[in-house]
């Protein structure tokens, strides 16, 4: 390999610097998802949800190296659906200009995109919370990211992908990340079935501090998720950061106010959920819309997704952490709104991108492309995920759901052998009316591999 | 003009060399120009590495018992402060009004914020006073230690840095300051649960001066013997990990075993914090390894990639090794393995390609998992396995660098080149690595042991707390606070209920 400098293209350190920063920022979103989900579940499953998010990074990082990057972003494939294996094991991934932006080399783009691939399954497995076995989940993550994420990302972001060729606009992953994970989580929830006690017991978040911590990591990291998707340090990246923050803010306030009208309380869970919905909705649009439009994304996304949370009651499935309502529905809302609010002058802020825009540019067909992109992603992800899980469940040793006794004692003790909070004897809640502490959960000191009498584990 | 008799007075940040003075009135031809992208990435990395330090704190804190939780979080941030700030430690309870009517969690927060605040105000004290100079002075010719030319940051300005001429000295200095701050925070993990805080703070200042600064000089100063020999250490396998691991072993041996009764299980009390700490560490390591390229360059990107891959594989490897024993997916195992993967890839990050990163992670995960048994075999109490993870892991990484370093990876950026490792046919490299690693480990161990041995003899600086303090917990006895005021009764620690019992 020649080592003369004349054969290596010259890149701007500022572009590389911003993309690498964004890489780390998106990395931090993944434990953010973990803490968010963990805080929303019951304490006996707290550690499992934190762990699974970080586990997803590990599995997908490895898969991305082996063939994930190649299947998604190989430059030599010409079919519209999936890449080839030219870059498997990262062969040839180094100094050449990347597909995402010619100003940035392949290796930078590859490590950045690895984080997108890593976060998507972490979102999807939220619906398996509190009753999914970890071992099949590990296997599922590897298979799913190969067979579902990589194709959908190829369609949207590879220059040969059918959606990109059609003209579908997806800046930072409304379809590959949110719609696909939301649909997959719906499939997982349906295959697993409802948690024990669903419908009779009240499942409440056990640790709101962790929910807010997770939201903070997510919102912080999303500057890298959307801003970094400009794959350069330019004004378009800055605009993406602006609209991201604005959509999150408006989304949080809207959801919180929607809940306020019901209970006259400023729900923290509502604010956090709304902020995440705003971030989800603005994701496909972040490099295409201006600030005023961002307000619409946050507002409309929060209202629709707040109502979408009722779907699980209407259709009687147990989406434990509302992943489908927030990511699936939120992603679709964002996709469609992109078709309305995209503006060509925003895309042109990087000096080179030319799009036809959306309704605001008079390009009414754009919504059609967005619907095609979003619906294809949602149905493909749902169908293939359901198939994968259905088949896995039949294989001996890969059954997806824990047995009833493990579910009652909790995944932390049953699957991990450790608890999240050894230092806490019991979790109490102070009754707001009587100011009396009320026992929520009695946590026992669990010696390794043994569990105390399960009848003492109570939920309200 | 307002300045006085001289028409062009010297600017305070001029280079110390007797070169041309900056002419304020004329153009800036004497000032080197830098790419803002390079400076931007190094400053971002500085902040990322800073965050690793509370990450260590939360990781160690979560692994220990709840009565010592706060001490471990605080000591990590204290390490930043001391290496940066020259103040004698004063127990926090004397500084903060103790108001029982407010939530006591606020007082804990005051302690943390106060420490961070002071650190920010007084940035870079030991490093400022002489640390940077002893490590990176450009005028010293000794192979072992720098001189004091840059003491008090004189002459640290916009001249091209020693690390990479693409960035100015000041950016390099603040970036390296974080490495110096992180290293003692790692080392004192082995003193967990039984080490007195006051001697620990003195120790940190002394140790970083006579152990960290020389070892870093050897590896990173152009006049250092290891660098001249050709030893490869990208982001600090020897200065940071081997030195802290060896030091922690010495500290554990001097302090002795922790006292425990039959009820103490020495288990992690807060796994949520363990994972939080791991998340901060992994996140920050993008800056630790990626930033060590000291430019927004392709090797920075490659370093980020191999770092992430090694951590992922290391976490899976350790977790699977634990799985074969008790058929559970241990979170402690995953987190420890991820950190080991990060440690092993550290010396190699900018020198190896993607595929070898897997070897680093797997080797680290497996070997360090076994290394945790050393403390049982040799009967010392390395409470948080700092030697097994950082000492042994660092050595593995340094040696594997000699195998997998590839000049073709370095050539991706153009100008600088190395001779490479085994895979380039350069077989002697591993000996340079062995020399570098062993020298660092033995020097750190011996000098640390001597420092601690002498300190223990000095009245007032005895290292270990007494039995009663140890039973009550460091938080209550040394800090006068608890980490968890909001918990009514801490599981398994009846001694602390007096502090946590909420006033009704």
Image (spheres, coloured by chain):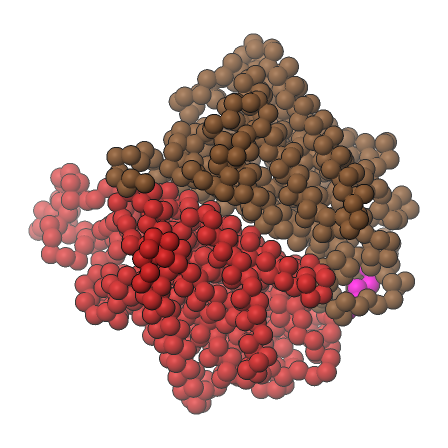
Chain colours: A brown, B red
> Image height check: is B113 above or below A251?
below
Does the stretch in magenta take in B481? Answer: no
Task: Tell me what residue is drawn at x 59 percent, y 58 percent.
Answer: B317
Quadrant placement of the C terminus of chain B = bottom right
Expressed as whole percent of the image width and height from the top left, the position of residue A396 reads: 80, 49
Looking at the rendering, the stretch of residues picked out in magenta corresponds to A441-445
Expressed as whole percent of the image width and height from the top left, the position of residue A418 reads: 71, 63
Question: Which residue occupies the foreground of this view, B66 or B413?
Answer: B413
Question: Which residue occupies the foreground of this view, A411 or A395?
Answer: A395
Task: Tell me what residue is drawn at x 58 percent, y 86 percent.
Answer: B466
Residue A19 can be seen, yes or no: no
Does the stretch in magenta take in A444? Answer: yes
Left-right relation of A124 to B441: right
* Among the 4 quarters of the image, the one containing residue A140: top right
Q: Main secondary structure of the magenta part?
A: loop
Task: Tell me what residue is drawn at x 73 percent, y 48 percent.
Answer: A136
Left-right relation of A335 to B426: right
> Image height check: is A243 above or below A440?
above
Question: Which residue occupies the foreground of this view, B372 or B359?
Answer: B359
* Among the 4 quarters of the image, the one containing residue A281: top right
Quadrant placement of the N terminus of chain B = top left
> Image height check: is B166 above or below B205?
above
* Among the 4 quarters of the image, the one containing residue A125: top right
Expressed as whole percent of the image width and height from the top left, the position of residue A122 reads: 65, 44
> Image height check: is B330 above or below A246?
below
Expressed as whole percent of the image width and height from the top left, the position of residue A69 reads: 52, 37
């Amino acid at each position: 390999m020649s080592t003369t400098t004349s054969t290596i293209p010259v890149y701007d350190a500022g572009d590389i610097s911003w993309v690498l920063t964004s890489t780390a920022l998106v990395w931090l979103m993944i434990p953010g998802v973990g803490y968010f989900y963990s805080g929303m579940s019951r304490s006996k499953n707290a550690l499992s949800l934190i762990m699974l998010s970080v586990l997803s990074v590990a599995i997908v990082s490895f898969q991305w190296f082996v063939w994930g990057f190649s299947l998604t972003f190989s430059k030599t494939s010409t079919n519209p659906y999936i890449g080839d294996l030219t870059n498997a094991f990262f062969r040839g991934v180094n100094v050449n200009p990347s597909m995402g932006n010619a100003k940035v080399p392949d290796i930078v783009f590859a490590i950045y995109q690895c984080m997108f691939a890593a976060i998507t399954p972490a979102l999807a497995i939220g619906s398996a919370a509190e009753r999914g076995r970890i071992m099949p989940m590990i296997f599922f993550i590897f298979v799913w990211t190969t067979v579902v994420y990589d194709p959908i990302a190829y369609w949207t972001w590879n220059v040969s992908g059918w959606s990109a060729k059609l003209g579908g606009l997806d800046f930072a992953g409304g379809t590959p990340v949110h719609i696909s994970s939301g649909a997959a989580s719906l499939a997982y929830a349906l295959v697993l079935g409802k948690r024990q006690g669903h419908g009779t017991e009240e499942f409440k978040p056990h640790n709101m501090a962790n929910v807010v911590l997770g939201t903070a990591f997510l919102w912080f990291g999303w500057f890298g998720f959307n801003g970094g998707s400009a794959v350069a340090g330019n004004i378009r990246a800055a605009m993406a950061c602006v609209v991201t923050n604005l959509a999150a803010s408006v989304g949080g306030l809207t959801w919180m106010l929607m809940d306020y009208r019901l209970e006259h309380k400023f729900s923290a869970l509502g604010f956090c959920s709304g902020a995440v919905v705003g971030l989800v909705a603005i994701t496909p649009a972040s490099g295409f819309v201006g600030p005023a439009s961002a307000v619409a994304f946050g507002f409309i996304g929060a209202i629709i997704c707040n109502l979408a949370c009722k779907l699980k009651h209407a259709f009687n499935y147990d989406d434990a952490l509302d992943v489908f309502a927030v990511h699936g529905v939120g992603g679709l809302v964002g996709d469609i709104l992109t078709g309305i609010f995209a503006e060509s002058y925003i895309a042109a802020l990087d000096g080179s991108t030319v799009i036809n825009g959306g309704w605001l540019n008079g390009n009414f067909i754009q919504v059609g492309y967005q619907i095609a992109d979003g619906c294809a992603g949602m149905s493909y992800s749902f169908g293939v995920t359901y198939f994968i899980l259905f088949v896995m469940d039949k294989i001996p040793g890969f059954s997806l759901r824990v047995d009833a006794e493990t579910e009652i004692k909790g995944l932390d003790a049953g699957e991990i052998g450790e608890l999240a909070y050894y230092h806490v004897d019991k979790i109490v809640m102070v009754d707001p009316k009587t100011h009396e502490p009320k026992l929520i959960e009695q946590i026992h000191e669990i010696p390794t591999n043994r569990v105390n009498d399960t009848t003492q584990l109570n939920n309200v | 003009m307002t300045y006085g008799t001289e028409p062009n007075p010297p600017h305070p940040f001029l280079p110390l060399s007797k070169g041309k003075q900056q002419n304020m009135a004329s153009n800036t031809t004497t000032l080197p120009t830098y790419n803002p992208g390079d400076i931007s990435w190094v400053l971002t990395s500085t902040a990322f590495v800073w965050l690793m330090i509370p990450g260590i704190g939360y990781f160690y804190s979560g692994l220990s018992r709840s009565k010592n939780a706060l001490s471990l979080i605080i000591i990590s941030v204290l390490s930043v402060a001391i290496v940066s700030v020259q103040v004698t430690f004063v127990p926090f309870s004397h500084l903060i009004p103790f108001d029982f009517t407010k939530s006591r969690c606020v007082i804990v927060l005051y302690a943390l914020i106060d420490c961070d605040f002071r650190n920010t105000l007084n940035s870079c004290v030991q490093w400022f006073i002489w640390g940077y100079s002893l490590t990176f002075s450009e005028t010293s010719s000794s192979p072992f230690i720098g001189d004091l030319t840059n003491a008090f940051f004189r002459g640290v300005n916009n001249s091209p840095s020693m690390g990479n001429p693409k960035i100015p000295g000041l950016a390099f200095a603040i970036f390296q300051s974080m490495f110096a701050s992180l290293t003692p925070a790692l080392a004192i993990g082995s003193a967990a649960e039984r080490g007195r805080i006051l001697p620990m703070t003195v120790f940190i200042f002394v140790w970083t001066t006579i152990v960290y600064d020389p070892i870093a000089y050897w590896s990173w100063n152009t006049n250092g013997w290891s660098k001249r020999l050709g030893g490869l250490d990208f982001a600090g396998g020897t200065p940071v990990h081997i030195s802290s691991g060896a030091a922690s072993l010495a500290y554990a041996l001097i302090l002795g075993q922790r006292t425990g009764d039959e009820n103490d299980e020495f288990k992690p009390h807060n796994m949520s914090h363990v994972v939080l700490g791991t998340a901060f560490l992994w996140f920050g390591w993008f800056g630790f390894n990626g930033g060590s390229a000291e430019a927004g360059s392709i090797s920075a990107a490659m370093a980020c990639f191999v770092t992430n891959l090694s951590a992922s594989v290391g976490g899976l490897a350790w977790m699977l090794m634990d799985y074969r024993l008790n058929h559970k997916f241990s979170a402690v195992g995953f987190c420890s393995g991820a950190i080991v993967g990060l440690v092993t890839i550290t010396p190699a990050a900018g020198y190896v390609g993607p595929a070898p990163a897997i070897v680093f992670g797997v080797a680290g995960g497996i070997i360090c998992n076994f290394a945790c048994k050393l403390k049982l075999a040799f009967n010392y109490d390395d409470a948080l396995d700092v030697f097994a993870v950082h000492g042994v892991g660092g050595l593995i990484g340094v040696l594997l660098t000699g195998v997998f370093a590839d000049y073709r990876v370095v050539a991706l950026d153009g100008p600088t080149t190395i001779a490479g490792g085994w895979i380039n046919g350069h077989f002697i490299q591993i000996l340079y690595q062995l020399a570098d690693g062993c020298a660092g480990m033995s020097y750190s161990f011996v000098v640390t042991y001597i420092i601690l041995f002498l300190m223990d003899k000095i009245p007032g600086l005895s290292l270990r707390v007494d039995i009663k303090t140890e039973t009550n917990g460091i938080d209550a006895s040394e800090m006068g606070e608890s980490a968890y005021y909001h918990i009514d009764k801490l599981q398994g620690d009846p001694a602390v209920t007096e502090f946590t019992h909420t006033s009704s």
